[in-house]
Amino acid sequence: MKKRNHGGGWQAIRYTLSKSRQAGGIWKLWKAMRSRNACKTCALGMGGQAGGMVNEAGHFPEVCKKSLQAMVSDMQGGIAADFFATYSVPQLQCFSPRELEHCGRLTQPVRYVRGENYYQPISWDDALARIADKLGEVAPDETFWYTSGRSSNEAGFLVQLFARLYGTNNVNNCSYYCHQASGVALSNTLGTGTATLTLEDLDHADLVFVIGGNPASNHPRLMTTLMHLRRRGGHVIVINPVRETGMVNFRVPSDPRSMLFGSAIASLYVQPDIGGDLALLTGIAKRIVEMGAIEEDFLRDHCTGWSELRERLNSVSWSEIYDSSGVTRADIDAIAELYAKSKSAVFSWTMGITHHVHGVQNVEAITNLALLRGMVGRPHAGLLPIRGHSNVQGIGSVGVAPKLKDAVFERLQNHFGIQLPTTPGLDTMACMESAAAGRLRFGCCLGGNLYGSNPDATFAGRALGKLEQLVYLSTTLNTGHAHGLAEETIILPVLARDEEPQPTTQESMFNFVRLSDGGPARHAGPRSEVETIAELAQRVLGATRPVDWHSMQNTHHVRAAIAAIVPGYEQIATIDQSKQEFQIPGRTFHVPRFATPDGKARLKTHALPELATGDGQLRLMTVRSEGQFNTVVYEDYDLYRGQDRRDVILMHPDDIARCGLRAEQRVTVSSEVGQMPSILVRAFDQIKAGNVLMYYPECNVLVPRTLDPASKTPAFKSVLVTVGAPVRAAVGAGA
Ligand SMILES: Nc1nc2c(c(=O)[nH]1)N[C@H]1C(S)=C(S)[C@@H](COP(=O)(O)OP(=O)(O)OC[C@H]3O[C@@H](n4cnc5c(=O)[nH]c(N)nc54)[C@H](O)[C@@H]3O)O[C@H]1N2
Ligand SMILES: Nc1nc2c(c(=O)[nH]1)N[C@H]1C(S)=C(S)[C@@H](COP(=O)(O)OP(=O)(O)OC[C@H]3O[C@@H](n4cnc5c(=O)[nH]c(N)nc54)[C@H](O)[C@@H]3O)O[C@H]1N2
Ligand SMILES: [Mo]
């Protein structure tokens, strides 16, 4: 595949046209894209009158390939009536993630019983009765409830309410594999778990750090903001072991000048080793102190922990910083210089920061750096965890977490006159471990792909296999439906956001609540998530007391409850009539008064972890390609990294030589938990030597279940692997 020197551009537009054919024509796709529904992909929060094409600041149009892919995927035809009679489960297990996604929309409930060969269609009534029967049989704490970030606030609120009234706090969402470290760290330091600024603030910043992320692929709409920042004379500092093409130069499809000539994105591109960020961030902080570029007054008046941090920065040695980060003095100086000059800096980060055993510390170190120069608690500057799923933040806000915030807990009890369980609920990995240990008997997954998103895929399949019943509410097939199978597995087909018969809401990563109007169903068969959960709850808990589940089938009533229970969500009660989308109060900090008990921000000190190394081993990051959305693969190619397939390992030419390998040869990649044979070596000089890259979810067989103890997030980005020629190469096994 031809290597590209920019992201975006005509390719994105050509792709749009080709996709529109699959969706039944450009007009049909245009109409779908313009319906008033929050965008289905990332959490940047597109929505409004022109649907997924307008951002919170009202800018239109913003073409994004990702939202097109998601839309076209939802617009595919239904799975053929004879599909499940044609393909056995063992056959489905041989399908790739891409093939499963392209089988079509799920339209009928199906059930698989271990020992049989096929999923069998069943009626909705039969499916719900079987689930209700099982829930009548097992104990509440033998169940778990997982939610992806794709569902609405209304569905999320209902599912956690149902689970808690049923009697368990084993309620969690995909955030535990994603931004949990950000939530924990921001709570530790600022008393809040989300971004401290609005989208509008970004438009006035003069410096943006993009740490451990590839928004050119994963949050394409952010690229317009970065392009404008550069045109204003601002700077972008990218910190990433990989020189990501789209972060160097991007062609913004909605901008003619950018389309023709490309837009430079990074002013400065610094490549640490995988896991080197904590040391690098500490180094930048040390340098800022040495330069006298700190805001003494701010640190004294609005922060605690400054003397400890100063002491720590003084005592940590430069050699330790270079060794543990893989970054040179010159690079650290260059970053510090740009930062020292900045008047309004924004720090953004994603999975390259959170997917580590020290994920929480990484985020705390980012916060330290921002606080040193008083960049939190004023307009046009602040902290921005770039969220993943379009509603992952809302799902958390409305209570899909093992432990409810105290205020939510109390209000929930009072509002419904109920007694909630107080047992500590299990986080996502703890659910998987408990399932593997035989302590859980039932699981319910509202969207997502719990199997596919887990580290140690072999273990994940085994853990889910121990359950007696596993229920999936899904729109399309994924690897979980083939490999994440309990004794009895039931798939319930649900409507996508823009097919819902009633309005729903979502929350963006800027704490902005969006309204989705819903729209006509594309297929007969799938049901709304809200109606399905409410009906199931009614069957299990009784129709009217303490919650009137029948009335909860109306999303307006669900919103009324959310408004009464979730602080900051009051305005949601009337959003369907007023159409007034809103900023959640109390989360944006434009003045230095933080949500901690004393109103001050807390600086944190850290020991520097050594870089992961092992004899002859390389550090592996597991990442997304441009052609996928999490475990859903739309296209096998990765455009900006110039890859035409996914069964590859991207290695620096020096590492290929050092390991005695050749580019384009087949190798076996092994880690402490698994092996992948027949992987193609690709020479990739954009990655820092010593580090290698593979695509998730396929490579999850290699990722151990090592967690950040503070956030329970798996270290998906730091896996020690050995890359070797296949042992049986001599007999011709793919060598
Ligand atoms: N197209 C598309 N968009 C998406 C998604 C998708 O799958 N596809 N997923 C959505 C979701 S849920 C999420 S969470 C986000 C994910 O968005 P990202 O976090 O941007 O996605 P990843 O592919 O996980 O890779 C992150 C980046 O981290 C870098 N990296 C790896 N290890 C390190 C490290 O140790 N330090 C640093 N500094 N960088 C490192 C990698 O080189 C890569 O560029 O995107 C959302 N948007
Ligand atoms: N190795 C490795 N593993 C990782 C990561 C990594 O970078 N590396 N990233 C992690 C991250 S950041 C995340 S967020 C997780 C992702 O974890 P999940 O959120 O669990 O997974 P997804 O792949 O996003 O889920 C896709 C499925 O959701 C269903 N779906 C789509 N739309 C809807 C809808 O509207 N309603 C319902 N009910 N279902 C719907 C479809 O069936 C689709 O197959 O993976 C994590 N796992
Ligand atoms: Mo994510």
Image (cartoon, helix red, strand yellow):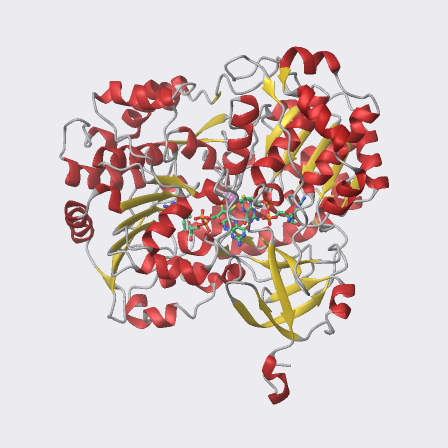
Instruction: Look at the picture and state if 360 lies above or below 512.
Output: below
Name the one closer to the observer, 495 or 318. 318
Assign the C terminus to one quadrant of the image: bottom right
* Residue at the spot 32% in from the left edge and 60% down from the top edge: 465
Residue at the (14%, 33%) spot, across then down: 543
Rendered-image quadrant of the N terminus: bottom right
Res 487 seen here = yes
Residue 249 in sight from this viewpoint: no
Residue 167 falls in which quadrant of the image?
top left
Residue 547 position in % (x across, y down): 19, 27
Q: How many marks?
A: 0
Q: Describe residue 110's horizontal placement relative to residue 582 as left or right.
A: left
Nearest the viewer among 49 and 443 is 443
Q: Position of residue 157 (x, y in %)?
A: 33, 32
- Residue at the far right in the pictured view: 330
Looking at the image, the residue that sits furthest to the bottom is 731
Residue 574 image position (x, y, % from top left):
36, 19
Q: In this rendering, is residue 515 above or below 591? A: below
Pinpoint residue 356: horizontal percent, then vertical percent: 58, 45
Which residue appears at 27% of the width and 69% of the height? 118
Q: Residue at x 78, y 28 (%)?
A: 339
